[in-house]
């Protein structure tokens, strides 16, 4: 087995939301301080933490609940990241010029905003039909106390499309951060396991705990390493799976080992034939997949 020279620790902030923006801010500051004491390099919150994944269908109420990208809520996390020297992936209902978005902003350990990602695959079959989808995926070098790591993000329903993780891998992601708000059962966990395996990336997912409606905890992390040198059999890439209770769960990604593994294994972008995949960008939808509520 390869010895682990360096690792990136992601704190999966599996927390119950409070009943207000200020309550969520105060609780997250408290728990970020705890995550820092636990040695975390990155703190990752569940989906749309600013409002506890509450999406009113009234546009006037939605407008009151949403926050802008220059809000005090976000500036507090910027300051906190710098103070604690910890990267923070904070999620929020964003008031944007294009509408309302389901958004994550990633700050590095100096408080620098690294990217702002809006969920591409909004759940238009449910409450998210009132939100505006993002239009791209982002990967950036993230400065942490354990060194630079290439990080990307996708949010909840994004993970159900292999293209999301594939694009992030092609853009260089080594770890993908996944804020989430839904029941994490065997099929959704299997999706994440597959995304990590086929792209040779680490994937860290933070969900809301039991007690938040339609959520059940089971935040998870997969390191994407299916084989260790010298071992005859493959291994489960799962490195942590939380239970249903509220708490902070540390996912320890062996980043040096992941990098070595990617240099020699057969997945990722090693043997692809992209010229043969033209149908993947054809926007035609035929039965049985036609849905009346589909939005481009």
Image (cartoon, rainbow, N blue to C red):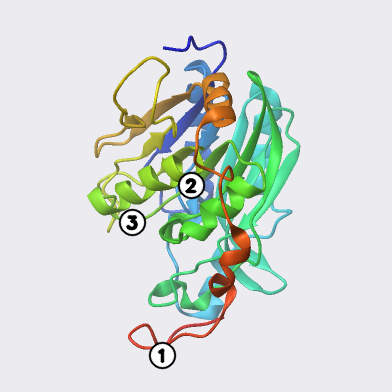
Q: Are marks 2 and 1 in contact (CB under 8 Å)?
A: no
Residue located beneath label 1 in the image: 292
- Density class for disc 3 (Cα within 10 Å; few <14, some 14-19, many ≥20) is many
Question: For the N terminus, which image quadrant?
Answer: top left
Expressed as whole percent of the image width and height from the top left, the position of residue 182 reads 33, 56
- Above or below, 52 against 241 in this view is below
- Density class for disc 1 (Cα within 10 Å; few <14, some 14-19, many ≥20) is few
Depth check, mark 1 against mark 3: the one in front is: 1
Residue located beneath label 3 in the image: 182
Q: Are marks 2 and 3 in contact (CB under 8 Å)?
A: no
Give the alpha-carbon distance from disc 2 to disc 3, as whole Å. 12 Å
- Density class for disc 2 (Cα within 10 Å; few <14, some 14-19, many ≥20) is many
- Tell me which residue sits at (60%, 54%) in the image: 167
Residue 17 at least partly seen: no
Label located before the other in sequence (2 or 1): 2
Residue located beneath label 2 in the image: 178
Whether residue 237 sits left or right of residue 58 in the image: it is: left
Give the alpha-carbon distance from disc 2 to disc 1, as whole Å. 28 Å
Q: Secondary structure at mark 2?
A: strand
- Above or below, 228 against 208 in this view is above
Q: Secondary structure at mark 3?
A: loop
- Tell me which residue sits at (41%, 73%) in the image: 127
Q: Secondary structure at mark 1?
A: loop
**Number of dots carrying numbers:** 3
Could you say which is closer to the camera, residue 296 or residue 38? 296
Question: For the C terminus, which image quadrant?
Answer: bottom right
Expressed as whole percent of the image width and height from the top left, the position of residue 100 reads 60, 70
Name the image quarter holding residue 95.
Answer: bottom right
Could you say which is closer to the camera, residue 32 or residue 188? 188
């Amino acid at each position: 087995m390869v010895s682990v020279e360096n690792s990136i620790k992601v704190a999966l902030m599996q927390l119950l939301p409070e009943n207000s923006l200020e309550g969520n801010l105060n609780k997250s500051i408290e728990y970020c301080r705890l995550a820092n004491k636990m040695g975390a390099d990155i703190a990752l919150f569940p989906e749309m933490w600013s409002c506890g994944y509450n999406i009113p269908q009234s546009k006037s109420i939605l407008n009151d609940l949403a926050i802008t990208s220059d809000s005090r809520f976000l500036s507090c996390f910027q300051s906190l990241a710098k103070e604690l020297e910890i990267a923070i992936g904070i999620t929020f209902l964003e008031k944007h010029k294009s509408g309302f978005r389901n958004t994550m902003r990633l700050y590095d350990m100096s408080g620098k905003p690294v990217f702002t990602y809006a969920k591409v695959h909004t759940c238009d079959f449910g409450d998210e039909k009132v939100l505006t989808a993002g239009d791209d995926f982002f990967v950036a070098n993230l400065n942490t106390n354990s060194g630079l790591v290439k990080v990307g993000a996708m949010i909840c329903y994004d993970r159900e499309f292999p293209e999301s993780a594939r694009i992030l891998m092609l853009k260089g992601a080594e770890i993908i951060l996944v804020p989430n708000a839904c029941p994490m059962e065997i099929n959704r966990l299997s999706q994440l396991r597959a995304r990590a395996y086929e792209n040779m990336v680490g994937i860290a997912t933070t969900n809301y705990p039991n007690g938040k409606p339609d959520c059940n905890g089971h935040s998870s992390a997969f390191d994407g390493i299916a084989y260790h040198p010298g071992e005859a059999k493959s291994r489960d890439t799962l490195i942590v799976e939380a239970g249903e209770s509220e708490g902070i769960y540390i996912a320890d990604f062996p980043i040096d080992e992941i990098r070595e593994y990617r240099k020699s294994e057969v997945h990722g972008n090693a043997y692809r034939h992209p010229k043969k995949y033209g149908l993947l960008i054809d926007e035609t939808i035929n039965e049985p997949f036609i849905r009346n509520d589909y939005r481009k």
